Amino acid sequence: MGKLLKLPAGKLSRLADSQRKEELKKSLGDPPAPLFKETRELILSKCRPEKKEEVRAIFEKQPFGELERLVTQKLLDVVKGVAKEELESENWLHLVARLSGRTYEQTRVNILEFLDTDVFNVSEKNCVAFLEPLIDSWDIDLATFGMEIALSRRLAPGDPKKFEYVQREPNQPEEEPGFREFLQDPSLTGDATPHEIEFLRGLRVKGKRPTPLYYYRELQNLRDPLHFRVARSK
């Protein structure tokens, strides 16, 4: 066909390849637009200092890629949750208004607009009005993508919000009920170390629900030197 059309060698195949790429782009749609520079800077300013530059490098290499969308979405989810709970609290609205430099009426209207926004449409106005005053800091484990978000104690007192992304079997509970009961019984947990607790938390018995006594016995097995071989030095 190339010879018939008197095209240079390889020209036709390159044209066909270019056309296929264009068709693929149309079928997939346009990639998500990156966040506004000011919005990204505000989100990064809340990142834990020792992680900030590493996270910034990833954000800039992959504009609004998986990591930036994940972080932005989780920050939005947490702040939206607080806003929904406090929407009818006049004292809380007045405090947010004062911290964000807006009137009470503006703040209430902005909250309603904010609750309707999503990760692809978050604006600088949303960030300044709500992410800025409510988010104290956030951190992420880049190996597991587990996140911890600390909220302003003035606007949302309580423990930091933690999110983990781990592989689980279908219908597998987050934590075995028997393990929770084991933790609540000092006569069973005794002086169990954090390392031992984490080991026991990960134990699963397919098709069965272990009792608190099961975890107690596993703890004793873990401590019994007869159950382990001594590592030989080479």
Image: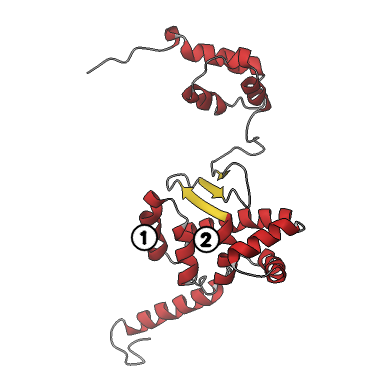
| Relative image position of residue 158 (x, y in whole percent) | 62, 43
Residue that appears at 63% across and 24% down: 179
Is 32 located above or below residue 157 in the figure?
Answer: below
For the residue pair 86 and 142, the one nearer the viewer reads as 86
The residue type indicated by label 2 comes to Arg
Relative to 131, 184 lies left or right: right
Residue that appears at 67% across and 38% down: 171
Residue 69 image label = 2
Q: SS class of the residue under badge 2?
A: helix
Quarter of the picture containing the C terminus is: top left
10 Å crowding of disc 2: few (<14), some (14-19), many (20+): some
The residue type indicated by label 1 comes to Ala
Residue 112 figure quarter: bottom right
Looking at the image, do the residues carrying marks 1 and 2 touch, with CB atoms under 8 Å apart?
no
Hey, which residue is sitting farthest right in the picture? Answer: 88
Residue that appears at 31% across and 81% down: 10
Q: Which residue is mark 1?
A: 57
| Relative image position of residue 174 (x, y in whole percent) | 63, 36
